[in-house]
Amino acid sequence: MTDPFRKPRPAEPVWLTGKLWKEIEKTHTSAFLAAFSPKLRLERWGSTLRALVSQPHPISADASLVSPPTDFPWNAGRVIWQVEGENSALHLLGSGWETEVQELGLTYGIDLTPGTAPGLFPDQRENRITLRSLRPKSVLNLFAHTCAFGALAATGGAATLNIDSSARALARGKENYARNQLEGSAHRFWTEDVRKVLPRLIRRGEKFDVVILDPPTFAHGSKGQAFRIAHELEPLLISCLTLTSRRGVVFVSINDSRTGDSQLVSMIQDILAREQIRARIKPGQRPPEVPPERMPATLWIFRED
Ligand SMILES: C[S@@+](CC[C@H](N)C(=O)[O-])C[C@H]1O[C@@H](n2cnc3c(N)ncnc32)[C@H](O)[C@@H]1O
């Protein structure tokens, strides 16, 4: 007897075209969004494909949903099926959680263990291209995580200061520098709360050609000092502008549904007017494979004084 309540088949994810896939690979990049549907996101991490399934009613593991179309230029060597927010995941092919990927010719270590941040945010690839094009001599990388912005600037010869409150994230960042032969005294890694370190840098008169400000929306701080972007953004921005050298640049990325591109621009225009800073604002860039609704609000502030 047929089941009148049989569940409809979940929507097949839409894959990037083979042409776009090859164009991204030509930039020496192997970490990017490969395919998506409303309930499923397929991420490519080197030779691994990770299926991320959304809650609250996740679809169950199904190998046919992770197969690329026929004649596709790539096949995964390992496939992981992960329900968002769960502490376990399933291998549909292969085993293990760690891998290395390339982005813009640099190598990064990736950890796909459930409950761990992979270690790279591929949606910032175009903004990292912009950073590289600025050829800064010094970069302050705030909320540095695994130091992807810092490492790319370092390949162009910049001295870098990476700051993050997570010792583990910074240790992974140092490993990324080592993977790309970027060690040396020009690169600093400070495990600190950004809010505490900025006044110290300002007192010491340090200046940077580029400041990267890519904070979380919310983070548990030590001693009850939780970080909430809505409260912290304005003082952080003012400090970043103070720390930029003449004609310096601040990059801002906000991943908060209440702060879209236009809200961010008007907030920054208010700050610039109040602080009497002359600057040009340019929108950030979104990689072609990232849907607009998944992209954080990003922009560049170019000081003109
Ligand atoms: C969105 S991630 C940054 C991504 C990074 N810019 C990149 O491109 O890989 C946020 C980072 O902020 C760090 N963090 C959270 N609160 C912090 C604080 N108060 N001070 C310093 N780092 C903090 C977290 O440990 C995390 O690594």
Image: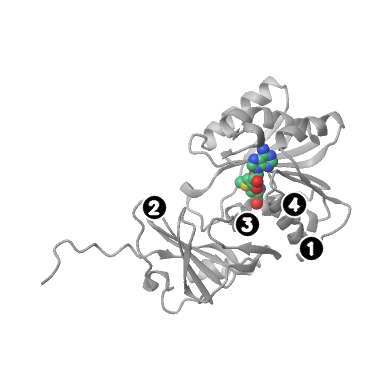
Q: Earlier in the sequence, mark 2 or mark 3?
A: 2
Mark 2 or mark 3: which is in front?
Answer: 2
Label number found at residue 16: none
Question: Horizontal and vertical percent for residue 262?
Answer: 53, 34
Q: Which residue is mark 3?
A: 120
Choose the circle earlier in sequence order: 4 or 2: 2
The residue under label 4 is 150
Residue 71 x, y percent position in the rendering: 45, 79
Kindly identify which residue carries mark 1: 178
Residue situated furthest left in the rendering: 1
Say above or below: 125 vs 296: below
Q: Residue furthest top?
A: 274
Question: Split into 4 quadrants, where in the image is the C terminus?
Answer: top right
* Residue drawn at point x = 42 percent, y = 73 percent: 67
Q: 28 and 233: which one is in front?
A: 233
Residue type for callout 1: Ala
In the image, what residue type sits under mark 4?
Answer: Gly
Can you name the residue that lies furthest to the front here? 223
User: SS class of the residue under badge 2?
Assistant: loop
Q: Position of residue 28 (x, y in %)?
A: 66, 68
Tag 2 near tag 1, CB within 8 Å: no
* N-terminal-most mark, 2 or 1: 2
Q: Is mark 3 within 8 Å of ligand 1?
A: yes
> Assess mark 1: CB under 8 A from ligand 1?
no
Please identify the quarter of the rendering in which residue 281 is found. top right
Mark 1 residue crowding within 10 angstroms, few (<14) / some (14–19) / many (20+): some
- Distance, label 4 to label 3, CA atoms, is 12 Å
Q: Is residue 301 above or below residue 40?
A: above
